Image (cartoon, rainbow, N blue to C red):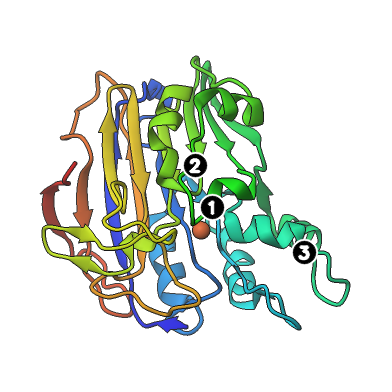
Amino acid sequence: MNYPSFKTTEYTVSRGKVPASFDGFRIAVIADLHDCTIGGDHSPLLQQLERLAPDLILLAGDMITETGRAPEHVQYRNAAHLLRQLPAIAPVWCGLGNHEKRWQEFAGEESLSFADWRSATGKWGIRWLENESAELVRGEDRLRVTGLSLPRRFYNKRKKVILTPAEIETLVGRADREAYQILLAHTPAFTESYMAWGAGLALAGHYHGGVVRLPFLGGVISTNFRLFPKYDCGCYPFPSGEMVVTAGLGCHTIPVRLWNPPELILLTLRSEGQERLPECRERVPLQQGRMSAGKEEVHGTHRV
Ligand SMILES: [Fe+2]
């Protein structure tokens, strides 16, 4: 699937105790590419990323599609074309989605394995965070990203599953409350638990913006077949941090995105004492195909 255009949504986040050294730090968030392309060869997306010049790029999972069908169980070539080029723009840290988890469990000898994929992308400069954490340090201040990789049972489509903060701690350890703690999750289904665990900023995708987006109602259905999911896409403030959910860049199986363009997110961190913008403010540069710089609209505070 190829999309000729995409939108960029910008949020300013400040609730999770952003250290002064990271004031103004910019993070691009990409998820759910599902091996689709933007503009045929990703060039509009790459040009936009180069123009935005983020300090860090975080990939929130499902860059590939695991089809479960032989002979080619995994569609990854378009994702590879993008991932190969991202590290030239900024450091790239990557979490796993449910499709990467399924790939891990597929043991077909004739296909590329997930271990091969992780190794190849690692050589290009992609840093994988599979229930691991990585840090950036500026003086005494630290920005810490923890990649949460959930077992497949947490993606069950038929029954409601609960993930407790204690279970998150079992998987990734304790949140670092001395650092700006980012949790790179994939599904927004457990948002409250992410915040209770101690995320100052949690990032997710997975629901593809609710597939079809209606005025006033938002996303219609999640990828686990729940109608009008609570966290379909947007920036959701909590007392101790924000949850940011992207509509993602692609789709799979049912190639539908109605009134729901592919989305790139750019976050700007704002520390206390600095000029504070309204929380979760979004700016949406409208674009068709290649980005024309400076064409932006202010849409005000996003809904909660
Ligand atoms: Fe997913």
* Disc 2 secondary structure class: loop
Name the kind of residue labelled 2 in the image: Val
Name the kind of residue labelled 1 in the image: Asn
Q: Residue furthest right?
A: 109
Indicate which label's residue lies in the foreground, 3 or 2.
Answer: 2
**Which badge, 2 or 1, is on the more N-terminal residue?**
1
Residue at label 3? 106
Q: Nearer the viewer, residue 111 or 272?
A: 111
- Give yes or no for contact between labels 1 and 3 (Cβ–Cβ under 8 Å): no
Image mark count: 3
Apparent side of residue 39 relative to residue 281 in the rendered image (left or right): right
Q: Nearer the viewer, residue 132 or 153?
A: 153
Q: Residue 89 location in percent, x, y?
A: 53, 57
Residue at label 2? 161
Q: CA distance from mark 3 to mark 2?
A: 23 Å
Residue at label 1? 156
Q: Residue 170 location in percent, x, y?
A: 65, 26
**Which badge, 3 or 2, is on the more N-terminal residue?**
3
- Give yes or no for contact between labels 2 and 1 (Cβ–Cβ under 8 Å): yes
Q: Nearer the viewer, residue 49 or 220?
A: 220
- In this picture, is 27 found above or below 171? below
Q: Residues within 10 Å of mark 2 (few under 14, many from 20)?
A: few
Name the kind of residue labelled 3 in the image: Phe
Q: CA distance from mark 1 to mark 3?
A: 18 Å
Q: Residue furthest front?
A: 159
Query: Which residue occupies 59% across, 24% down?
Result: 169
Query: Which residue occupies 48% across, 24% down?
Result: 197
Q: Residues within 10 Å of mark 3 (few under 14, many from 20)?
A: some
